[in-house]
Image: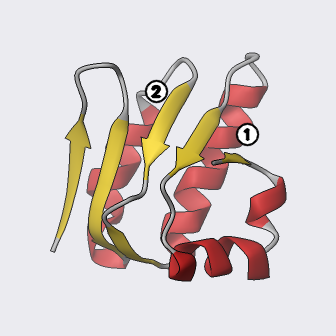
Amino acid sequence: MFHVDHGTEGTIALIGRLDASQADKVKSVFENITESKIIDLNKLEYISSLGLGILFSAQIRLKEKGHQLKLINMNDHIRDVFKYTSFDKMFEIE
């Protein structure tokens, strides 16, 4: 199961397993982001290559406009995925 939660302060939380079956839901959220956002990954259990691609596309688009995605609260597994794919160099991560 996967869920996107929009926090009261503009934070977006990704919860559950982000895989290909959730692509349309996630794309629609990230395609509508027009300014810098904090993405809370505290409850993200899994991210597929498709999920990484969606985040990367949003990051590239936002950087062209002087904005970015900041990723927070990664668990060790998700942090390893970002490290092994070198995506940790493309995002600000706390």
- Where residue 7 sits, quadrant-wise, is top left
Q: Is residue 34 above or below residue 63?
A: above
Q: Earlier in the sequence, mark 1 or mark 2?
A: 2
- Residue at the (68%, 33%) spot, across then down: 61
- Residue at the (75%, 74%) spot, across then down: 83
- Where residue 52 sits, quadrant-wise, is bottom right
- The disc at residue 33 is 2
Identify which residue, 79 or 59, lies in the foreground.
Answer: 79
Q: Is residue 41 above or below residue 86?
A: above
- Residue at the (78%, 24%) spot, across then down: 64
Q: Quadrant of the N terminus?
A: bottom left
> Residue placed farthest to the left in the image?
1
Q: Position of residue 56 (x, y in %)?
A: 66, 53
Give the left or right position of residue 58, taking residue 30 as reference. right
Give the left or right position of residue 35, taking residue 20 as reference. right
- Could you tell me which secondary element the residue under label 2 belongs to? loop
Q: Is residue 50 above or below residue 37?
A: below
Few, some or many C-alpha atoms within 10 Å of disc 1 (few <14, some 14-19, many ≥20)? some
Q: Position of residue 15 (x, y in %)?
A: 26, 61
Q: Position of residue 3 (x, y in %)?
A: 19, 57
Name which residue type carries label 2: Ile
Identify which residue, 83 or 66, lies in the foreground.
Answer: 83
Name which residue type carries label 1: Ile
Q: Is residue 50 above or below residue 39?
A: below
Few, some or many C-alpha atoms within 10 Å of disc 2 (few <14, some 14-19, many ≥20)? some
- Could you tell me which secondary element the residue under label 1 belongs to? helix
* Display colour scheme: secondary structure
Give the left or right position of residue 69, taking residue 29 as reference. right
**Which residue position is annotated with label 1?**
60
- Where residue 22 sits, quadrant-wise, is bottom left
- The disc at residue 12 is none
- Residue at the (24%, 34%) spot, across then down: 6
